[in-house]
Amino acid sequence: MADENIFPMPEGAEAAQQENYTEAQLNQDTDYDPQPVFMDDGNDPADDVNIVLDDGTGTQEDEQRNWYVVHCYSGYENKVRHAIEQRIETMGMRDRIFDVIIPTEEEIEVKDGKRKTVEKRVFPGYILVEMVLDEDSWYVVRNTPGVTGFVGMGNDPTPLREEEVKAIMDRMDDASGPTVRADFKIGQKVRIVGGPFNDFIGTVNSIDSDKLKVRVMVDFFGRETPVELGFLEVEKV
């Protein structure tokens, strides 16, 4: 079947349409004025702007990274820390568990007339773990032999506050020097082992740990006489 125009054009309309189209086309060709093209000379300040796409992962991790207190068997802190560090390596958790520390401080211990520097645990039976807490990291730490649990409410570990962490770290890094612990008590009988009162027996009257001094009351010709001595100049009877 021959194609038919469904809506036939009126007589003479086709010629008028063709004439109008030709005139419009000529006008368009005459008015055509292309936009100028500029070559980039490389001096556009916008070219110096670096666009960085932030996926947000770094900030989120920093916000979730906290210190947690882990309870373990007292006296086994070093073994438990070593075990946790081994599990971090073998289970590929370095990106979730960052550090394991045992808070300690140096202490000078005076005992039996001898002075010895020892490392004292600040919180016996506890270690600190810096980590991003999730099911995997919790499982690695909690199921380490020797660990009895996290400090917190139920199964929800409670992270330490920033001021608490700072106080612990400052105590570990205290530049004022080690504390001194003497094996003496007020009212205790001691023997003097140096100086003019050597081998005298006296009673501890006061203890000055800052100066490493002890005051001893000595019976001297029937009278109690106070004698100030160094920690290393006396010993328990």
Image (tube, rainbow, N blue to C red):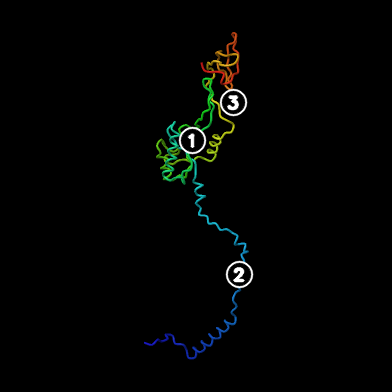
Q: Earlier in the sequence, mark 3 or mark 1?
A: 1
Instruction: Report the side of 45 relative to 142 (left or right).
Output: right
Q: Label 2 is placed on what type of residue? A: Met
Query: In x, y percent, where is residue 231?
Result: 56, 21
Viewer-closest of 85 and 125: 85
Q: Which residue is rendered at x = 61% and y = 64% of the image?
A: 42
Q: Label 1 is placed on what type of residue? A: Ile
Using the image, determine if residue 177 lies above or below residue 160: above
The reply to whether callout 3 and callout 2 are in contact (CB within 8 Å) is no
Please identify the quadrant where the N terminus is shown: bottom left
Query: In x, y percent, where is residue 210?
Result: 59, 26
Q: Residues within 10 Å of mark 2 (few under 14, many from 20)?
A: few
Task: Give the mark toward the camera: 1 or 2.
Answer: 2
Query: In x, y percent, where is residue 74?
Result: 44, 31
Mark 1 lies on a secondary structure that is loop
Residue denoted by label 1 = 102
Distance from disc 3 to disc 2, alpha carbons, whole Å, reads 80 Å
